[in-house]
Image (cartoon, rainbow, N blue to C red):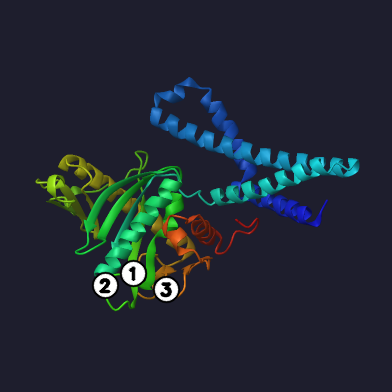
């Protein structure tokens, strides 16, 4: 076996060992047996919500176990084929088996990232809020670029995107916006994007073509499903209604259908203007508030466990998680993980997976993934 392939095989075997450890293999096998036994009992459907939750857990476990076992078997088969090909001098068999090993290496890297999406709400849909920082038109334009970037990323990931609220800037861009992303592990992928994002470029709004630095903040929180109870006292909230902003003309909403809810104890503010119906916007805003309060509780738990500072901070110098430099050179750099891209336009078009994967690994391990680099 060639040295390159031997090295890949060693990495893959180390990856399997790490994956089983993260997955708590023996416990997971026992849990799957328990769930399979329960699934044969028709009485579980007396509580449909609990039954569906159990079936989702069963499907997730079964899928993960089956995938790992298949990868391990494919590796063993490929090693046998290479040994057979070498014994018989069949180069075609060796080439085919080596291609399978490279494919396994890639699949394993993806599976390792998926193990990082094991938080309590990682599988949920997610809300994404974007706010422009100080700086007027510059920052508002930057906020709209971030909004487009995340919508592009979600579309590339096969997720459904809903624009819930948008507050336009005076001349260009947006002051704020909230979108809802619906898809597998939406919150798990997006949660590491919370923080301040910094843009450096030659301003298209400056007649002297000077370089400007702009800031915008991103805040991500999970949609709370019905199985999670969050108590909110209406007496603790202030509810305001206002006219939805729009494109003008026939699109102007002439009624106060937009809803803003302020949770007085925490200072959290949510708003929705996606629907023409105030009733529907109010219901969505309450859901968003419950989600924000739930996210606050998740953050407190994480801070207690990791003793790390909260990611939400002032929108300005010293607090950014990522810099996007368009001039005088081109570079996007994540300041937490060190991951860089010299193709900022691709990043702004939604090519964010490398940044998200590294941030997930850093959040869980405090560093890079321990095996199998992600190409």
Neighbours of disc 1 within 10 Å: few (<14), some (14-19), many (20+)? many
Asked if the residues shown at circle 1 and circle 3 are in contact, with their CB atoms under 8 angstroms apart, the answer is no
- Which mark, residue 364? none
Neighbours of disc 2 within 10 Å: few (<14), some (14-19), many (20+)? few
Between 316 and 68, which is closer to the camera in this rendering? 316
Where is mark 1, residue-wise?
215
Q: Is residue 75 left or right of residue 130?
A: right
Closer mark to the observer between disc 1 and disc 3: 3
Q: Residue farthest to the top?
A: 42
* 13 versus 315 height, above or below: above
Sequence-earlier tag: 1 or 2: 2
Q: Is disc 1 placed on a helix, strand or loop?
A: strand
User: Is residue 201 something one can see in this rendering?
Assistant: yes
Residue positioned 80% across, 40% down in the render: 93
Q: Is disc 2 placed on a helix, strand or loop?
A: loop
Q: CA distance from mark 1 to mark 3?
A: 16 Å
Q: Is residue 176 left or right of residue 343?
A: left
Sequence-earlier tag: 1 or 3: 1
Residue 147 at x, y percent in the picture: 34, 56
Which part of the image, by quadrant, shows the C terminus?
bottom right
Residue positioned 9% across, 46% down in the render: 254
Residue 327 at x, y percent in the picture: 42, 73
> In terms of image quadrants, where is residue 207?
bottom left
Residue positioned 39% across, 27% down in the render: 47
Residue positioned 17% across, 49% down in the render: 259
> In terms of image quadrants, where is residue 85?
top right
- Which mark, residue 327? 3
Where is mark 2, residue-wise?
135
Asked if the residues shown at circle 1 and circle 2 are in contact, with their CB atoms under 8 angstroms apart, the answer is yes
């Amino acid at each position: 076996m060639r040295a390159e392939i031997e090295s890949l095989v060693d990495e893959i075997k180390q990856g399997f060992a790490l994956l089983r450890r993260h997955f708590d293999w023996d416990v997971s096998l026992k849990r799957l047996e328990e769930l399979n036994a329960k699934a044969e009992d028709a009485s579980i459907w007396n509580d449909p919500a609990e039954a569906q939750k159990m079936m989702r857990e069963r499907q997730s476990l079964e899928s993960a176990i089956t995938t790992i076992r298949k990868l391990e078997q494919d590796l063993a088969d490929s090693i046998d084929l290479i040994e057979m090909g070498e014994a018989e001098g069949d180069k075609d068999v060796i080439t085919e088996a080596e291609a399978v090993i490279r494919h396994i290496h890639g699949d394993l890297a993806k599976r390792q990232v998926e193990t990082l999406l094991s938080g309590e709400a990682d599988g949920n849909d997610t809300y994404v809020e974007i706010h422009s920082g100080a700086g007027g038109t510059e920052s508002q334009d930057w906020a709209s670029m971030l909004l487009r970037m995340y919508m592009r990323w979600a579309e590339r990931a096969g997720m459904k995107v809903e624009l819930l609220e948008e507050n336009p800037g005076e001349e260009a861009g947006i002051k704020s916006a909230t979108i809802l992303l619906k898809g597998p592990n939406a919150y798990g992928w997006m949660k590491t994007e919370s923080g301040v994002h910094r843009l450096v470029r030659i301003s298209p709004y400056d007649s002297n073509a000077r370089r400007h630095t702009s800031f915008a903040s991103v805040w991500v929180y999970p949609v709370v499903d019905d199985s999670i109870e969050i108590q909110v006292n209406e007496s603790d909230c202030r509810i305001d209604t206002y006219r939805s902003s729009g494109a003008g003309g026939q699109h102007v909403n002439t009624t106060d259908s937009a809803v803003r809810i302020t949770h007085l104890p925490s200072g959290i503010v949510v708003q929705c203007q996606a629907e023409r119906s105030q009733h529907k916007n109010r219901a969505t805003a309450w859901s968003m508030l419950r989600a924000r309060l739930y996210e606050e509780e998740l953050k407190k738990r994480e801070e207690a466990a990791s003793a790390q500072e909260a990611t939400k901070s002032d929108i300005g110098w010293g607090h950014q998680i990522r810099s996007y430099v368009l001039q005088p050179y081109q570079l996007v750099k994540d300041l937490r993980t060190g991951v860089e891209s010299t193709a900022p336009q691709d990043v702004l078009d939604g090519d964010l997976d490398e940044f998200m994967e590294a941030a997930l690994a850093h959040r869980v391990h405090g560093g890079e993934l321990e095996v199998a680099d992600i190409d």
